[in-house]
């Protein structure tokens, strides 16, 4: 139950108000001055303050101002015997929720208290939810490739142009799509997602365009499609490369005409959506293989955004690992763990075929499984990477192999580590290794290190 503090210099008011609110089930304390109030709030957290405006030394409004300066977030109701507009305006600006006037009507007071607490509760809940959502949607990464990506997002977002996001599995394509929406002029509209790969072919049309009652068996009522639901907002067509040619033709028409036709409907419905599409396929190859329509590709690909694989992002892998461990620790109510230097090294060396999604899963696994506060090399043994110095077989015995293969392995790891320190920048890596850029390239190719970009 809520905890309330009454601040009033009249003993009678403290007693009667306190009595009524206690009868309502609240926990109530009372003090007789602004100074005492400022002191009392440092001792205990109050959900609500009932604050008299006229107090002997420090008056109610000044007390409120100081409370706010100190970051006290309790809800506040002002009590006043001499309600005037100026006071009301000042108090409201300082964030007071309501006024009650002396002589106090007890019924009205109880009602005001209830409303104030309900509002306070909603605000707190809202803040908590927002913080959670914000944390889930941050893009972590400082490497040059990620900085470039951020710039591309910022440039694309306000234009209203269609965006085609490409990148391997788990690189963060959906996250990028959400950011484009959030930074756009449509951010107050809906972000509607359709996973084209997950919906059976016979349902996708009705999913996208809606249907009318009786259009097919099972269509028991009218249903609006995702295009319509996204009107005023953004429609995210995920895994667009998996859409059938037949559906592609319909989507193309919808994009060209900004009109959709619900299944079984007689006339078109005008829609106003911004389409963002994503794919992990190479659409140019899909076009060559006649699995993707070239005209649709050109419609969608107004602004292309490429999300780089995790292995090209240098030390972002460490930043992301720490980010996920912190996020998940909070979610599970566990203590945050650190990665040892050796463990960090292994994170850098691993190739991350499943990219950021895989890293998140690994972070979750080690947070739960690793004993103690530090995540060490042994906790990451399942990744199957080993630095040459620690190369051991499953029984823990050192592995001996031909010198050239050991040397290759060592060189490969060393170059990967150097690349990582240089955030994936090849020119800089060549410089610190004192190699010609072209030599470094050649070496990387022969060792099977594949940077996709420079
Ligand atoms: N840069 C990043 N910072 C923080 N979290 C990220 C980042 N990139 C991806 N994630 C997180 O990793 C997970 C996978 O990202 P997302 O779903 O956006 O990837 P995707 O490319 O759409 O994956 P898929 O190809 O599997 O559909 C999500 O939990 C996402 O929040
Ligand atoms: Mg996705």
Image (tube, rainbow, N blue to C red):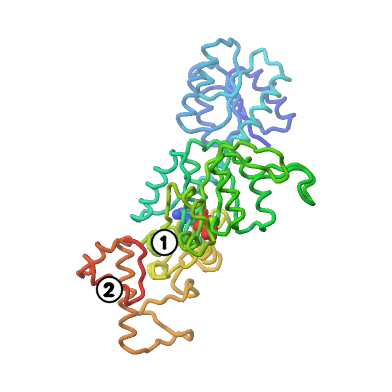
Asked if the beta carbon under badge 2 is closer than 8 A to the nearest atom of ligand 1, the reply is no
Relative side of 436 to 131, left or right? left
Give the x, y percent position of residue 119. 63, 31
Q: Nearer the viewer, residue 217 or 113?
A: 217
Q: Is residue 378 above or below residue 401?
A: above
Give the x, y percent position of residue 132. 55, 46
In percent of the image, x 46 and y 42: which residue is there? 161
First in sequence, mark 1 or 2: give its number.
Answer: 1
Relative side of 226 to 369, left or right? right
SS assignment at label 2 = helix
In percent of the image, x 52 and y 68: which residue is there? 371
Whether residue 49 can be seen here: yes
Which disc, if any, is residue 442?
2
Relative side of 125 to 305, left or right? right
Asked if the beta carbon under badge 1 is closer than 8 A to the nearest atom of ligand 1, the reply is no
Whether residue 329 can be seen here: no
Viewport quadrant of the C terminus:
bottom left
Q: Is residue 312 above or below residue 391?
A: above
In percent of the image, x 77 and y 50: which residue is there? 216
Q: Nearer the viewer, residue 58 or 208?
A: 208
Estimate the spatial distance between the alpha carbons at disc 1 and disc 2, rounded to whole Å.
Answer: 25 Å
Q: How many neighbours does mark 1 have within 10 angstroms: few (below 14), some (14-19), or many (20 or more)? A: many
SS assignment at label 1 = helix
Q: Is residue 352 above or below residue 243?
A: below
Q: How many neighbours does mark 2 have within 10 angstroms: few (below 14), some (14-19), or many (20 or more)? A: few
| Quarter where residue 262 is shown | top right
User: Label 1, on which residue?
Assistant: 317
Viewport quadrant of the N terminus:
top right
Give the x, y percent position of residue 278. 51, 54
Give the x, y percent position of residue 58. 48, 19
Q: Nearer the viewer, residue 390 or 243?
A: 243
């Amino acid at each position: 139950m809520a905890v309330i503090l009454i601040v009033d210099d009249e003993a009678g008011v403290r007693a009667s108000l306190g009595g009524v609110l206690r009868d309502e089930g609240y926990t109530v304390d009372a003090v007789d001055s602004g100074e005492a109030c400022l002191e009392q709030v440092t001792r205990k957290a109050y959900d609500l303050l009932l604050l008299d405006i006229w107090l002997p030394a420090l008056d109610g409004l000044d007390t409120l101002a100081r409370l706010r300066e100190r970051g006290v977030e309790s809800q506040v109701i002002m009590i006043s015997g001499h309600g005037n507009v100026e006071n009301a305006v000042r108090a409201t600006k300082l964030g007071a929720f309501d006024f009650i006037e002396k002589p106090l009507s007890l019924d009205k007071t109880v009602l005001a208290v209830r409303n104030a607490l309900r509002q306070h509760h909603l605000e707190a809940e809202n803040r908590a939810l927002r913080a959670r959502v914000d944390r889930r949607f941050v893009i972590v990464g400082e490497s040059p490739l990620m900085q470039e990506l951020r710039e591309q997002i910022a440039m694309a977002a306000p234009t209203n142009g269609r965006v085609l996001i490409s990148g391997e599995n788990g690189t963060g394509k959906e996250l990028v799509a959400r950011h484009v929406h959030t930074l756009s002029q449509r951010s107050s509209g809906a972000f509607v997602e359709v996973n084209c790969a997950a919906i059976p072919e016979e349902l996708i049309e009705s999913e996208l365009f809606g249907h009318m009652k009786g259009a097919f068996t099972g269509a028991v009522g009218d249903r609006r499609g995702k295009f319509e639901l996204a009107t005023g907002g953004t429609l995210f067509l995920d895994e667009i490369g998996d859409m059938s040619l037949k559906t592609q033709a319909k989507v193309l028409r919808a994009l060209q005409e900004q009109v959709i036709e619900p299944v079984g409907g007689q006339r078109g419905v005008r829609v106003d959506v911004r389409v963002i599409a994503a794919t992990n396929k190479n659409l140019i190859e899909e076009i060559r293989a006649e699995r993707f329509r070239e005209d649709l590709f050109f419609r969608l690909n107004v602004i292309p955004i490429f999300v780089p694989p995790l292995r090209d992002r240098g030390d972002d892998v460490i930043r992301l690992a720490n980010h996920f461990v912190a996020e998940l620790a909070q979610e599970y109510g566990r203590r945050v763990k650190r990665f040892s230097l050796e463990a960090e090294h292994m994170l850098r060396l691993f190739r991350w075929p499943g990219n950021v999604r895989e890293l998140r899963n690994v972070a979750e696994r080690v947070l739960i499984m690793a004993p103690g506060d530090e995540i060490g090399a042994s906790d990451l043994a399942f990744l199957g990477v080993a630095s040459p110095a620690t190369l051991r077989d499953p029984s823990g015995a050192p592995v001996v192999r031909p010198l050239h293969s050991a040397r290759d392995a060592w060189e490969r790891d060393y170059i990967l580590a150097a690349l990582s320190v240089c955030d994936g920048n090849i020119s800089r890596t060549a410089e610190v290794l004192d190699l010609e850029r072209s030599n470094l390239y050649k070496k990387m190719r022969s060792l099977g290190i594949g940077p996709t970009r420079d």
